[in-house]
């Protein structure tokens, strides 16, 4: 039997299971360690956070300390314990939330670590935000895109993942489209939207949009594309807080 107090931990576990590679390394508390190992994550990649500094075997597997890890999942116990562990403090400074579940003392936050450190993360995140704002504004100003005032504000404010903006731009190459929705994924209320629902005026138009979305390659490729009637839904993997760099590297434009 689960209770409301269990919901944040279960939400974080579900998010990690669905979105984190089994090859990534996570710093977690003991309760989540058990759940993730049961879910199929390799034991060596799920690390009790306090062992990073206190266990010699863990130290040998992670000679660079927190810089050998990819995520840190904070709970109340991790937040309190980190005050005595400089390595975990450094990991927290060099990380940013990608999913948040619950509130107060029950809150669980999945944080993506930038192995290059806090300074690099801040600078890269600022560049990524500026890129999303620039490309989102280009889309918002495109007369072929029909969007609500709230959606337009999200685009202009950098609230849409840069890969998704490229996807919208690719769809516009097939003709005018309506931005039917920018769905919020569980736990991702404060992160850039990584899903879009596009509506066309005909099934044939939707087929063209689907084809263009499926034609995106490499870092731009969506995880899932689904067409139903005149609507096409596309979803990308969770964004890196430092940005994907796909637009700065010239791999795509928003149209």
Image (cartoon, rainbow, N blue to C red):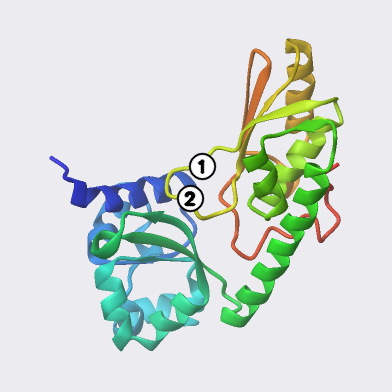
Image vertical order of residue 241 relative to residue 162, above or below: below
Residue at x 65% of width, y 12% of height: 229
Quadrant of residue 204 in the image?
top right
Instruction: Estimate the x, y position of residue 109 in percent, counting from the top left.
Output: 38, 61
Question: Helix, strand or loop at disc 2?
Answer: loop
**Few, some or many residues within 10 Å of mark 1 (<14, 14–19, 20+):** some
Q: Which tag, 2 or 1, sits closer to the chain's start?
A: 1
- Residue at 75% in and 12% down: 202
Marks 2/1: CA–CA distance: 6 Å
Quarter containing the N terminus? top left
The residue at the point 67 percent across, 40 percent down is 149
- Disc number for residue 189: 2
Tell which of 83 and 231 is nearer to you. 231
Q: Within 10 Å of the Cα at label 2, are there few (<14), some (14-19), or many (20+) other Cα atoms?
A: some
Residue 113 x/y as whole percent: 52, 69
Above or below residue 162? Residue 142 is above
Decide if residue 106 is on the left or right side of residue 11: left
Kindly state the secondary structure of the residue where label 1 is placed.
loop
Is residue 146 placed above or below 38 in the rendered structure?
above
> Which residue is the extreme one toward the left?
1
User: Residue 177 appears in which quarter of the rendering?
Assistant: top right
Left or right for 63, reference 181: left
Report whether residue 217 is seen: no
Task: Residue 239: give x, y in percent of width and height.
Answer: 60, 54
| Residue 94 seen in render | yes
Q: Residue at x 63, y 52 (%)?
A: 159
- Quarter of the picture containing the C terminus is top right
Q: How many marks?
A: 2
Q: Which residue is mark 1?
A: 184
């Amino acid at each position: 039997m689960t209770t409301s107090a269990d919901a944040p931990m279960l939400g974080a576990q579900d998010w990690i299971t669905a979105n984190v590679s089994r090859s990534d390394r996570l710093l977690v508390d003991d309760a989540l360690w058990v759940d993730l190992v049961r879910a199929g994550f390799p034991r060596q990649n799920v690390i009790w956070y306090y062992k990073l500094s206190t266990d010699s075997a863990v130290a040998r597997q992670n000679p660079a300390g927190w810089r050998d890890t990819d995520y840190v999942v904070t709970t109340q116990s991790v937040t309190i314990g980190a005050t005595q562990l400089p390595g975990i403090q450094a990991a927290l400074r060099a990380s940013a939330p990608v999913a948040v579940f619950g509130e107060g003392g029950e809150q669980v936050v999945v944080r993506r670590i930038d192995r290059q450190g806090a300074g690099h993360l801040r600078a890269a995140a600022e560049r990524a935000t500026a890129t999303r704002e620039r490309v989102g504004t280009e889309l918002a100003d495109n007369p072929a895109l029909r969007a609500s005032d709230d959606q337009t504000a999200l685009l202009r404010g950098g609230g849409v993942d840069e890969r998704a903006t490229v996807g919208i731009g690719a769809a516009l190459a097939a003709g005018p489209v309506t931005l039917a929705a920018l769905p919020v994924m569980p736990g991702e209320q404060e992160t850039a939207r990584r899903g879009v629902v596009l509506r066309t005026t005909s099934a044939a138009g939707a087929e063209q949009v689907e084809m263009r979305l499926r034609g995106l390659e490499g870092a731009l490729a969506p995880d899932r594309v689904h067409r139903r009637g005149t609507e096409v839904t596309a979803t990308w993997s969770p964004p890196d807080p430092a940005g994907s760099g796909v637009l700065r590297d010239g791999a795509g434009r928003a149209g």
